[in-house]
Image (spheres, rainbow, N blue to C red):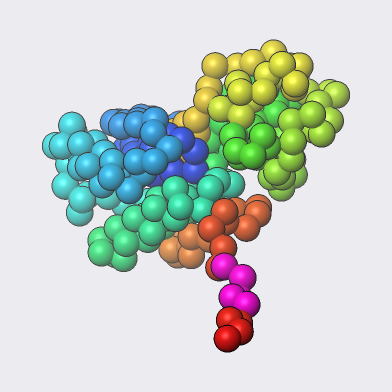
Amino acid sequence: MLVLVIDTSSAATTAALVAVSGGFAPSLVARQLNVDARAHGEVLAPAIAACLAEVGAAPAELAAIVAGTGPGPYTGLRVGLVTAAAFGHALSVPTYGVCSLDGIGAALTEPRLLAAGDARRREIYWAAYTDGVRTAEPEVAKPADVATAGFTACAGAGARLYADLLGLPLRDLDYPDPVALARVAADRIQAGVPSETLIPLYLRRPDAVEPAARKPVRT
């Protein structure tokens, strides 16, 4: 089965085609990666088109769509999830959500990994993984406040940015790997589980908020 994988939870916009079939590990068919935190909306659709064109596939050949659900910033994350939901609806194929940090943690065979994305505001989105399996829900925190005792390594854009504060060996994977995202969802895909509502994992309120009520003007 040909699966479209989308992730816009970080500064990177990822679109990929992954082959998923019973008895075999998911494999990468095509991938487009663009690193620009301000360009998710501009580059995602062309990236999907480029992946399909690279292998001569039509959208109708897609069997499912997997989307990284974050944690991530509001605007970028919304672009990916809305696009995934729109494609799923238009093609009548199921959509499945996967925590974006799983695309880092599940991609590395590390005894105890700290996967960390850049949350801005001098903070990281992070989660712990044991042999590729997440052991708790993701959190957002300042790097110096994360208890790193017991971890054997770290990975992700946040880990690279704050490697000195985390004090762990750094693995070379900054952004979610689409094959790992597809692997986490593979059982649902192969079982034909009904389409899921793609719920974003923000962990905190968006930067843009409604202004406070204006004070009345006295004359």
Considering the image in quadrants, where does the C terminus appear?
bottom right
Q: As drawn, is 137 to the left or to the right of 11?
A: right
Q: As drawn, is 213 to the left or to the right of 37?
A: right
Q: Quadrant of residue 49?
A: top left
Residue at x 57%, y 54% (from the top left corner): 207
Camera-nearest residue between 124 and 82: 124
Residue at x 61%, y 23% (from the top left corner): 161
- Give how far across and how far down residue 11 sits, in percent: 46, 35
Camera-nearest residue between 60 and 36: 36
Residue at x 50%, y 30% (from the top left corner): 175
Residue at x 65%, y 31% (from the top left corner): 115
Q: As drawn, is 143 to the left or to the right of 61?
A: right
- Give how far across and how far down residue 80 sits, in percent: 40, 50
Q: Is residue 49 above or below residue 161?
A: below
Identify the magenta region. Answer: 211-215
Q: Is 100 included in the stretch rendered in magenta?
A: no
How many marks overall?
A: 0
Q: Is residue 88 above or below residue 62?
A: below
Q: Quadrant of residue 24?
A: top left
Q: Which residue is at the far top?
A: 169
- Give how far across and how far down residue 211 sits, in percent: 57, 67
Provide the major secondary structure of the magenta segment. loop
Q: Does the rendering let one see residue 213?
A: yes
- Give how far across and how far down residue 3 sits, in percent: 34, 45
Q: Is residue 69 above or below residue 165?
A: below
Q: Is 214 included in the stretch rendered in magenta?
A: yes
Q: Which residue is at the far front?
A: 219
Q: Is residue 166 above or below residue 61?
A: above
Considering the image in quadrants, where does the N terminus appear?
top left
